Image (spheres, rainbow, N blue to C red):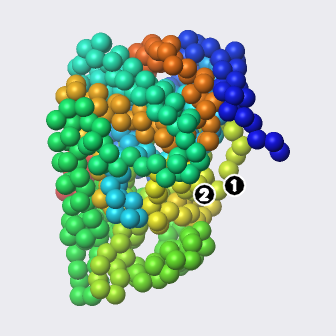
Amino acid sequence: MKASTIAEREARGRAAREHSKRSSHKAVGELHRNPIELLKQSSEDRVHNLVPLRYGRMAVSPFTFFRGTAILQAHDLSQVRDSGLTMPICGDGHLMNFGGFATPERQLVFDLNDFDEVSVGPFEWDLKRLTASLVVAARHMRLSRGAAENLVMTAVTEYRDRMSQYAQCGALELWYDRITFDRMAETALTPEGRRAVRRGMEKAASRTHENLLEKMAERHGEHWTIRDAPPALFHVLGANTLFTEEETEAFRTGSSRKMLERMWGEYLKTMSHDRRELLSHFTVQDTVFKVVGVGSVGTRCMVVLMVDHMGKPLFLQMKEARPSVIARFYKSQGNKHEGERVVQGQRMLQAASDIFLGWATGPLGRHFYFRQLRDMKLSANIELFDVDLLEGYARLCGWIMARAHAKASGQAIEVSAYIGRGDQFAEALTGYAAAYADQVERDYDVFLKACRSGELEARTDEDMAADFRM
């Protein structure tokens, strides 16, 4: 097949404006849906006793509510016309789903770091999730309307400018491009920004498996056991379990060790030979259930502690992969294995991925993916940021999203041509983000009423922890 010329590809990008004008992205659309019904749907088949904790974490603020409602925004985005420029997208690229971690070469990079909703979709859906999160967060931090608008303009113009640069790059240049902490420090516009990057590097260096071992586990002779810390961490068949008797049945019948061995064998088949060889040096010590995040609370997530012949630890996480909300509402092609979808999407969008990524099928046919629990991983505490640091962070997120989209899709030329050189697209998304933040606040009020009326049960971590101290 004859390859398209650059001019033809630019023309294709500009032609997409006829399908969806850049100014049209301001529209939120007519939203006739019940947010509580959609939330209940997204809570189906989760660990029953953890669903109230999910709602409790979401009830803290409109911002935590937004983090737990990717299903709502995916539904809402499907109600308005899209650009037609589709590619692998993160699907939940809000500003807390970016973070720092170490590459296999032990280089610190900053990148997207949550791919539970990854799927093929319109490129702008990722940007709309990001820009709405910036406005919701700015309001949560009591920043002015002008400051919130400036954050969106900053993120989207950075995305536009970086995409324009990536449109000039060869395929290998895109594949090898990494946003390292050193590059971040060089490009930071203020001395405080550079200091924040350096502090992050120091903090990340301390977040290792060995440090985690001291905090999470205790040694009994030659064996390590992870300490229960309910509701966040507990043994499924232990005294502190939050599983119902019915939910533990799969663990009791045929023993949990046999089940783990079968999953482990399947997981190893998804790894390259050298990584299987590396894992052969470790033996399993303990397995616990871990409650993660906000939107993921109630999905099944296990932590496996392993040690090598020198007693050095490795923590692996087995996380349930549920169908993507993007695939549900964009009607993209279904996936044979949701864990494989997450892993392949992560490998495509990230500049460098965890060497232990893989997937397997668990009890009752549930899909899981594997990754390291913590390896110099770092997330931003944006509530401690001032306006200048938040603006720098918004710029960084725009840059990262452009790099991820350009690498995963090979469509930097088309997307750059669609956006153009002016501010029209950024201004449209600024209008969208403010209007959608209004919608988030309305939905949050409906959600709180449902919690107060008893239609939804919401409990805090402190509430649930107190149950175990009685």
Residue type beneath disc 1 = Lys
Q: CA distance from mark 2 to mark 1?
A: 8 Å
Residue 367, above or below 69: below
Instruction: Kindly indicate whether the residue at mark 1 contacts the one at mark 2 (C-beta within 8 angstroms).
Output: yes
In this rendering, does residue 445 appear at all?
Answer: no
Which of 468/39 is in front? 39
In this rendering, does residue 49 appear at all?
Answer: yes
Residue 139, above or below 101: above
Left or right placement of residue 371 versus residue 267 in this view: left
Which residue in the rendered view is the most extreme toward the right? 1
Residue depicted at 29% across the width and 27% down the height: 391
Q: Position of residue 360 (x, y in %)?
A: 58, 65
- Secondary element type, mark 2: helix
Q: Where is residue 151, by image quadrant?
A: top left
* Label annotation for residue 21: none
Which of 165/463 is in front? 165
Which of 137/262 is in front? 137
Disc 1 marks which residue?
336
* Label annotation for residue 340: 2
Residue depicted at 23% across the width and 52% down the height: 201
Q: Position of residue 453 (x, y in %)?
A: 38, 26
Which of 429/264 is in front? 429
Circle 1 crowding by C-alpha within 10 Å: few under 14, some 14–19, many from 20? few
Residue type beneath disc 2 = Glu
Residue depicted at 34% across the width and 79% down the height: 307
Q: Position of residue 264 (x, y in %)?
A: 53, 74
Q: Where is residue 301, by image quadrant?
A: bottom left
Residue depicted at 17% across the width and 42% down the height: 195
Q: Position of residue 87 (x, y in %)?
A: 62, 38
